[in-house]
Amino acid sequence: MSPPVVRFAPSPTGYLHVGNARIALANFLFARRHGGRFLLRLDDTDTARGKPEFADAIAQDLGWLGLAWDDSFHQSARLDRYAAAAERLKRAGRLYPCFESEEELRAKREQRLRRHQPPVYDRAMLKLTPAQRAAAEANGKRPYWRFLLSNATVEWTDLVLGPRAVKLPAVSDPVLIRADGTPLYTFTSVVDDIDTGITHVIRGEDHVTNTGIQRDIFAALGADPAAIGFAHLPLLTDSDGGKLSKRLDSLTLRSLRADGVEPQAITSYLARLGTSADPEPLDLAALAASFDLGAFSHSAARFDARQMLALNRRVLHAAPFAAMAERLPPGATEAFWHAVRGNLDLLNEARGWWDVAAGAITPPVIEGERDYLRAARDLLPPEPWDGEVWQAWTTALKSATGRKGRALFLPLRLALTGEEHGPELRELLPLIGRDRAARRLEIAAA
Ligand code: GLU
């Protein structure tokens, strides 16, 4: 196939959450896999709901994930293109003016439902005469514009879901232009997909009906919808299996970043979620090499934050110091990173271990261990310390006290770190140093 062109098209009405990130990633990996182009399009014609701050935040968050786009544009910069396309549809009789209010439409819908008819718009305004329209406009009303759907069943072979069909007679003619003249996403998206030469539309399953409608609009604008591949990824559910929950909606990339989750853990998890392949910590190039739309299941994918955190651990354990240095507490050394990385679920936990290694912590008083801890303090070897100091110290302590195993080690760990579990003391102790170690043993013995 010729190199594909795909787009991720968020509306700047909020921060990106994991569901959006998954769609963006699928588009990015598909483009990389096939040597194509990945566009970022901001669907910002709805000025009432969209905000420029969100557009900036979306770009930042995608950048943080590493999903570099080849080109980007805002729909708000292309209003003349949409106006021109709308004129063509009007001339072809496919866009017709409407004047019904929300209230009138609601009343009609309710009436149809009472009669057990599908609540589809009845096209009453198609019968509007020029005189009636002139009268409405003389009354100060401005029309909004509906697209006259064809009477067809739209069929395509979805690249994820397989054969799909949308019966257009069961769908209301969509409004494409508001009364204030602003165009709606359903329309602008098609104009852009044509103008930018989009070859594949990859988006969420919630857009399946839109695809039926938009393929009809493609054809009305003279483009061949059969030349475009459509792929709809099933939605995410939370780990209880519930519908895309509020919780997942609020799982934004911002909040994950603030929590210290690694972008690679997110991309590695989302790239495989909903496929039968196990997620592994891979970089984007490796994820792209194995990316296949056909590998996604037809049913909803269950997002499990624990699995993502398990990947996060694996990413951290393998991360070299140089990649992390900037995000570690000031002064943190390579020896420190190697000592603690195997114990982190999230990078921000390094902060606490840095306090253990190089700051001031107050260990708990350990009941019944006064004599043992004092002996431990007295046996601390003189500095300078190296990687052998732990071994030397505990060997001396063992022969002085006769202790071994847990009884030997646990009081030392508690006194030196304030925690029952943590990084190898063999690696931590030289970082802590003799003064701090002696002070902590003294406090814990008190
Ligand atoms: N702005 C639309 C959305 O966020 C884009 C959908 C599409 O990819 O066409 O749902």
Image: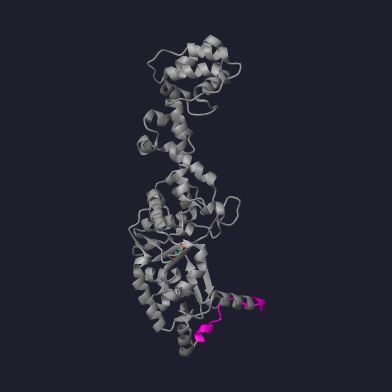
Q: Is residue 321 above or below residue 409?
A: below
Quick one: which residue is furthest to the top in this view?
400
Residue 317 sits in quarter: top left
Quick one: which residue is furthest to the left in this view?
70
- Is any atom of residue 61 visible in this view? yes
Q: Is 363 left, or right, of 26 in this rendering? A: right
- Is any atom of residue 160 visible in this view? no
Residue 287 placement (x, y as % from top left): 41, 50
Q: Is residue 60 above or below residue 164?
A: above
Q: Is residue 313 above or below residue 416?
A: below
* Nearest to the observer: residue 197 or residue 59: 59
Residue 385 placement (x, y as % from top left): 39, 17
**Residue in the image at 51% along x and 81% along y:** 151
Which quadrant: the C terminus? Answer: top right
Q: Is 69 left, or right, of 339 in this rendering? A: left
Q: Is residue 110 above or below residue 357?
A: below
* Nearest to the observer: residue 335 or residue 64: 64
Residue 1 placement (x, y as % from top left): 36, 64
Residue interval drawn in magenta? 112-127
* Nearest to the observer: residue 286 or residue 196: 196
Per the image, is 115 magenta? yes
